[in-house]
Amino acid sequence: MRILKQEIYFPIIIGIHFVFWAIDLYFYNGSFKEVSSDTLLFGELTNASWKNPHRILGEVFSSWVVTVFAFNFLMATRAKWVENLFGGLDKMYLIHRRSGVIAVVLLLAHFIVVPRDLVAFNIGKPLGFYALVLILLGVIISAIPFFKRKIPYHKWLNFHKLMGVFYVLGVVHGILVESLIKELPITRVYVFGMAFIGIAAWIYKAFLFKIFNKKLSYTLADIRHVNDKIIALHMQAITNSLSYKAGQFAFFTFPSISKKEQHPFTLSSHPHDENLVITVKNLGDYTKKMISQLNIGDSVLVEGAYGKFSSAYSKEKEQIWIAGGIGITPFLSLIKDYYTKKVTLYWCVSTESDAVYVTYFETIAQQNPLFEFVLWESSKRGHISVDDLSIRNPKDKSYLICGPAAMKETIMHELKQDGVKSTNIYDEEFAFR
Ligand SMILES: Cc1cc2nc3c(=O)[nH]c(=O)nc-3n(C[C@H](O)[C@H](O)[C@H](O)COP(=O)(O)OP(=O)(O)OC[C@H]3O[C@@H](n4cnc5c(N)ncnc54)[C@H](O)[C@@H]3O)c2cc1C
């Protein structure tokens, strides 16, 4: 599994917790005690001091759960500063996915280890159990590939939004039950502060995002059928135009298909172009409807722009661009950007008939000595590898990769084996869940 450098945030959270917990526990001399408590696997505790490892560990786990989920809700707000922190919305959603799984493991660890007070009934206790079951169910359905394949994206997203409700249940459980966290001044402020941030982020995304995040209105000015599976949609701004950089993407709503559904597409136009253009391949239900049902004059709502996949990072170096299939879209925009060093674009397609932009790139290559174009047909030559690129001095170049996950993973792995630093490799995820 590929580890992103932005995932450093996770050990940082753990580190912060250790510091707060250590300071608080060092100075704590309160009377918190297990009069009669039970743990799921480790037996009963009678008149045990708060210093018992089950209590401390169990609650440390729960404080991590609260914080990791709070960050997950923050990520879901798509706020620019959060996107910058996590290196682009696509990376952020990848981390969001993994954090959710980590939080559930920590939640289970909390459930197994933490002692349950047997003396008095408290509504917080069953609430905690229901929260655990619902969060577990939520993450299983959200993260397991089987469910992702079976459940249409918009239905899956509607269910996923309920994670906020389950989180609130968990936080209410934390407020109601007796706990060491409530006794410790720094940890208490930190954990409940994080819970507040998490809940506020969820409320913002679920109820206020649409109000504050106004979408831009466009009209469909032209629809070009590039082949039977790919269309290029040209859109004209009604009032304000989208501000974006080459290589970024945005979320699009086509009310004539669905007023609610929103899908991400890379902008294949360049910021200097008059119209906004996206190039869409039929990959499922919605994209199929886009090809068959959209008409010139239809309205389009645009939200964005997002993403960090831009040659802006790497203009000082020679660049290798590698695209797989419809992953060519950011390069349709980047090719019109300004660059001073050589750029070589490898476009991997299954067969020549899929290489719909070949003449376009070949013409640019003939006119611009800084640009070289190589078409790679995998039906004839197999999947492309770094050896096939025959790159001289690979460490001195920067790499932009966009395409199927398997292709990206293989190439990035091989580049790293050849000594290319991960800071010189940029990639774009074409899937958010
Ligand atoms: C950053 C980014 C840039 C993209 N750029 C392009 C592009 O330039 N051209 C292009 O053809 N495709 C692009 N895609 C892929 C495109 O968004 C999906 O193919 C499309 O949303 C699939 O919808 P569907 O209902 O037709 O297919 P489905 O079969 O329903 O979905 C296929 C997969 O697409 C993803 N997906 C579906 N709906 C959504 C949604 N509303 N939001 C986010 N992901 C969703 C899910 O991972 C899903 O499993 C991009 C995706 C991302 C994340």
Image (spheres, rainbow, N blue to C red):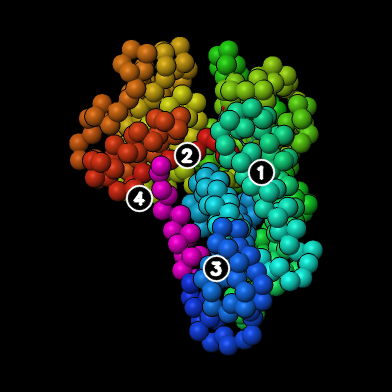
Please state the horizontal and vertical placement of residue 344, each as a whole percent of the image.
Answer: 32, 32
Q: CA distance from mark 4 to mark 2?
A: 14 Å
The structure residue drawn at horizontal position 58% and vertical position 12%, both measured from the top left corner, is 228
Q: What is the quadrant of the C terminus in the image? A: top right
The rendered magenta stretch, by its main secondary structure, is classed as helix
Please state the horizontal and vertical placement of residue 66, each as a whole percent of the image.
Answer: 62, 62
Q: Looking at the image, is mark 1 or mark 2 nearer the viewer?
A: 1
Please state the horizontal and vertical placement of residue 58, each as a whole percent of the image.
Answer: 57, 65
Question: Mark 2 belongs to which amino acid?
Answer: Glu
The structure residue drawn at horizontal position 46% and vertical position 54%, both measured from the top left corner, is 7
Q: What is the quadrant of the N terminus in the image? A: top left
Mark 4 or 3, nearer chain start: 3
Q: Looking at the image, is mark 4 or mark 1 nearer the viewer?
A: 1
Q: CA distance from mark 1 to mark 2?
A: 29 Å
Question: Mark 1 belongs to which amino acid?
Answer: Leu
Please state the extent of the stretch shown in magenta in the rendering. 1-16
